[in-house]
Amino acid sequence: MPGSRSPILDVLQRLAPGTRLREAFERIMQQGNGALVVIGSGPAVEDICTGGFRLHEAGFTVAKLAELAKMDGAIVVDDQAERIVRANVHLIPDPNMKTVETGSRHRTAERAAKQTGRPVVSISEDRAVVTVFVGHEKLELEPPTIVTAKVNQSLGTLDRFRDRLDTAVERLNRLEVADLATYREVVTVLQRAELVRRIGASVDRDSVALGGEGELVRLQLADLLQGIDTLQTLVVRDYVNRLSKASVDRTLAAIGEIPTERLHDPSTVSAAAGFDRADSEVSPRGLRLL
């Protein structure tokens, strides 16, 4: 559904540049070491831990985590990353759990994240790359300079697509007033609105990875996405065959599930929305214009 947000974004916010965890990971890479860090403790984590040692009242600091990473085992910190709970631990998740990773550290991290539901961070010693596993999701933490360049490019793309959407909406307005609207114009608006929403979600994800430096990006993003969800909902309410909340929600969900590479196909969007022939004239209920 529009507006949904992936759980991994909350983890990215906690690992953004300037946070203590991110500084610790960067120091580990500077030392030429690798690491396996579980963010969060509890019974599910304890079930896959063996060996190592417990740390009592060990407050989290960047230096402590970096020093403990010099040992081979994994490190477990509490949910808020305020204490280091265990160190030099051997993680033994279910070996039957499927994984697409090849390296032993990454395979363990992926399985541990799936089994415990806790974020698990794997730092590659050879590649000096930080990979975050959250449930069934995976993301590599990129340097801020690379993320910034990507965000700026995406914002430019989003701006162009928003202009195209606004143009499509203006055309639909004129045709509705003249009672000449067809499903083709409606589908064009829905296509472009969904593309704008998806590009915005990608920019939102990257802006979170910038931490405090992403505040300006989020302000620009909010401006470019203003009214998108409302527009989608009102257009569907105007033209859906049966006007009910359940019917509107199903239509929006169906459009949201269309793969991006097929979103450019008008017939795919028409089918998801339950529309008839593209060039059939249709009268809106007028809810959007009102």
Image: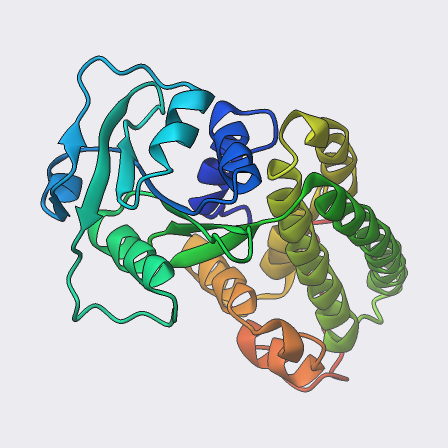
For the point 57% across and 81% down, which residue is it? 271
269 above or below 130? below
Name the quadrant containing residue 111.
bottom left
Which residue occupies the foreground of this view, 129 or 111?
A: 129
Image label count? 0
The percent position of residue 63, horizontal first and vertical second, equals 44, 22
The percent position of residue 287, horizontal first and vertical second, equals 67, 49
The percent position of residue 277, horizontal first and vertical second, equals 68, 87
Left or right: where does residue 88 sit relative to residue 270? left
136 above or below 185? above
For the point 22% across and 12% down, which residue is it? 57
Which residue occupies the foreground of this view, 144 or 280?
A: 144
Scheme of image coloration: rainbow
Which residue occupies the foreground of this view, 152 or 129?
A: 129
Which residue occupies the foreground of this view, 2 or 37?
A: 37
- The quadrant the C terminus occupies is top right
The percent position of residue 51, horizontal first and vertical second, equals 11, 42
